[in-house]
């Protein structure tokens, strides 16, 4: 889901059906805060879930994702990158980026660059990734760091506030994380907390929550999330706020 040019865009994803192809590449648009929606049809990129997404240089950018059965080796992971100004006309920036095909990566715009952070190549405790890649345009990518200070992870939260990157929690090695790291360059990272949400144990850590910076830039918010190896395990419906320093 994007907020772009005063409209909300929702695209891709999957249903719980195991019949046929439960993955999507459709795009919907709402310009009245979600009250009504217009279908923009199917995008030219293949059906997928776990899409990395951000807005960059006035355009929406998506990358990676996956489709197919999660049983055995039938899940297909992707590393193509696409962009669009309106959600209807798409340009393929690269069919095969330098980074390993993956799902659940986080894509952000930082200091006029694109950064791709972490993700996964499966759904078991040993398939998370921790590398960080950078691109000027989304077409050519180079490795920024193979092993940042934080552990490998998927389902993590990544936001940009001023010139600072925040990486929050996620899932790795069958553990729900509760840490928070910051960086100004994507290479050097500092752990700011290992008790995010007042949590210091696996049973209260979270992944797949929704992180946002408030419109006035005064706080970082996280909404919901999961704390379970199983899809139908423990889910959260709480909202937390971290106050951010005021502008000097």
Image (tube, helix red, strand yellow):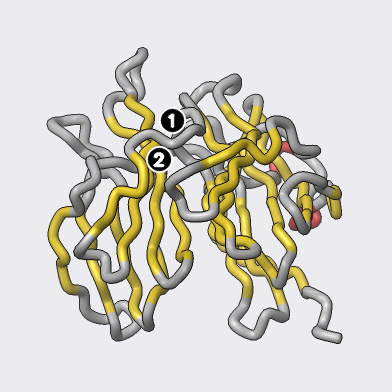
Number of marks: 2
Q: Residue at x 43, y 30 (%)?
A: 101
Give how far apart the Cα atoms at labels 2 and 1 are: 6 Å
Q: Residue at x 34, y 51 (%)?
A: 82
Q: Residue at x 64, y 68 (%)?
A: 221
Q: Picture coordinates of residue 85 (x, y %)?
A: 31, 69
Name the secondary structure under disc 2: strand
Q: Is residue 69 visible?
A: yes
Which sits earlier in the primary sequence, circle 2 or circle 1? 2
Q: Which mark is residue 101?
A: 1
In depth, the one of 32 and 115 nearer the eye is: 115
Q: Picture coordinates of residue 135 (x, y %)?
A: 54, 49
Query: Badge 2 is on which residue?
Result: 64
User: In this rendering, would 232 be left or right of 244?
Assistant: left
Looking at the rendered image, the quarter that the C terminus falls into is bottom right
| Relative height, residue 233 to residue 124 (above, below) | below
User: In this rendering, would 242 be left or right of 123?
Assistant: right
Q: Is residue 224 visible?
A: no
Residues at marks 2 and 1 touching, judged by CB atoms closer than 8 Å = yes
In depth, the one of 188 and 141 nearer the eye is: 141
Q: Which mark is residue 19?
A: none
Name the secondary structure under disc 1: loop
Looking at the rendered image, the quarter that the N terminus falls into is bottom left
């Amino acid at each position: 889901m994007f907020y772009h040019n005063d409209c909300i865009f929702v695209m891709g994803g999957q249903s719980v059906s195991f019949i046929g192809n439960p993955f999507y590449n459709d795009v919907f648009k709402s310009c009245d805060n979600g009250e009504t929606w217009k279908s923009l049809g199917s995008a030219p990129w293949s059906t997928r879930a776990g899409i990395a997404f951000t807005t960059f240089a006035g355009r929406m950018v998506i990358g990676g994702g996956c489709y197919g059965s999660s049983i055995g080796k039938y899940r297909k992971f992707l590393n193509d990158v696409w962009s669009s100004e309106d959600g209807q006309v798409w340009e393929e920036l690269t069919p095969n980026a330098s980074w390993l095909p993956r799902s659940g990566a986080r894509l952000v715009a930082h200091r006029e660059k694109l950064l791709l952070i972490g993700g996964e190549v499966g759904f078991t405790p040993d398939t998370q990734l921790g590398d960080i890649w950078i691109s000027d345009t989304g077409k050519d990518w180079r490795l920024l760091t193979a092993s940042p200070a934080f552990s490998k992870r998927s389902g993590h939260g990544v936001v940009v506030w001023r010139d600072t990157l925040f990486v929050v929690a996620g899932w790795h090695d069958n553990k729900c994380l509760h840490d928070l790291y910051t960086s100004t360059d994507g290479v050097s990272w500092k752990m700011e907390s290992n008790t995010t949400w007042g949590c210091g144990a696996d049973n209260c850590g979270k992944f797949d929550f929704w992180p946002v910076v408030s419109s006035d830039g005064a706080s970082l918010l996280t909404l919901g999330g999961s704390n379970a190896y199983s899809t139908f395990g423990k889910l959260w419906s709480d909202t937390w706020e971290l106050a951010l320093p005021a502008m000097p």
